[in-house]
Image (cartoon, rainbow, N blue to C red):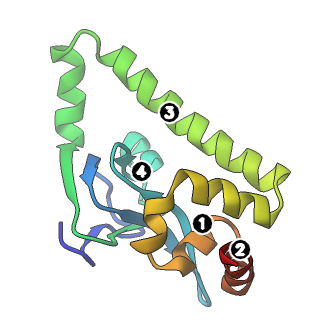
Amino acid sequence: MKKGDYFLNTNKECDRLSFVQSGFLRIFFETEDKEVTQWISTKGYFVTDLSGFIFNQPARWTIQALTDVEIYTIRKSEYEKIKTIIPRWPELERLFIVRCFTTLEDRIFSHLSMTAEERYHFFFENNKELFNQVPLQYIASMLGMRPETFSRIRKKQLS
């Protein structure tokens, strides 16, 4: 995918699941007055609207490439066939779902237990490569901060 291309749009059918080999994709939704970034998918992560993909619901998220992206994609129909071809598939699927769940749990924990400065510092220490390649307002949104708060914390960290 090229930078700026859309992997998925809100309210559309989500019939694919992709593994990110390289690049960054932003998962977000829009309201009348703002965009909210839910996640930035990086190398080694899967990308989809999980509820849409698994339960055949319209997508809640828009997913857009922030850089040129190399992904490996499987369609829903192929995904269903894998279960009959690969005997260990239920185990692999469980590991994928557990990873999704623990990532979500970590995000919730950080939002409930850390200050904005602590969230910034923790995220920066674990995702330094994003800070030079992704617009900072997307990172701020993902961390649950207004851009002004994010900038103030960043300025303080850099000094």
From this view, report whether residue 107 is shown above or below residue 4: above
Q: Amino acid at mark 4?
A: Gly
Looking at the image, tell me whether mark 1 or mark 3 is earlier in sequence order.
3
Name the residue rendered at 69%, 60% in the picture: 121
Q: Amino acid at mark 1?
A: Met
92 and 12: which is toward the camera: 92
48 vs 67, left or right, is right
Q: Are marks 2 and 3 in contact (CB under 8 Å)?
A: no
Q: In this orientation, does residue 127 appear?
A: yes
Label 4 belongs to which residue?
52
Name the residue rendered at 21%, 52% in the picture: 71
Name the residue rendered at 19%, 38% in the picture: 77
How far apart are the alpha carbons under marks 4 and 3? 18 Å
Looking at the image, tell me whether mark 4 or mark 2 is earlier in sequence order.
4
Residue 123 sits in which quadrant?
bottom right
Q: Are marks 4 and 2 in contact (CB under 8 Å)?
A: no
Looking at the image, tell me whether mark 1 or mark 4 is earlier in sequence order.
4
11 and 69: which is toward the camera: 69
User: How crowded is the residue under tag 4: few (<14 C-alpha within 10 Å), some, or many (20+)?
Assistant: some
Looking at the image, tell me whether mark 2 or mark 3 is earlier in sequence order.
3
Disc 3 on helix, strand or loop?
helix
* Residue 37 at x, y percent in the picture: 54, 69
Label 1 belongs to which residue?
142
Disc 2 on helix, strand or loop?
loop
How far apart are the alpha carbons under marks 1 and 2? 8 Å
How far apart are the alpha carbons under marks 1 and 3? 18 Å
Q: Amino acid at mark 3?
A: Arg
Label 2 belongs to which residue?
145
Label 3 belongs to which residue?
99
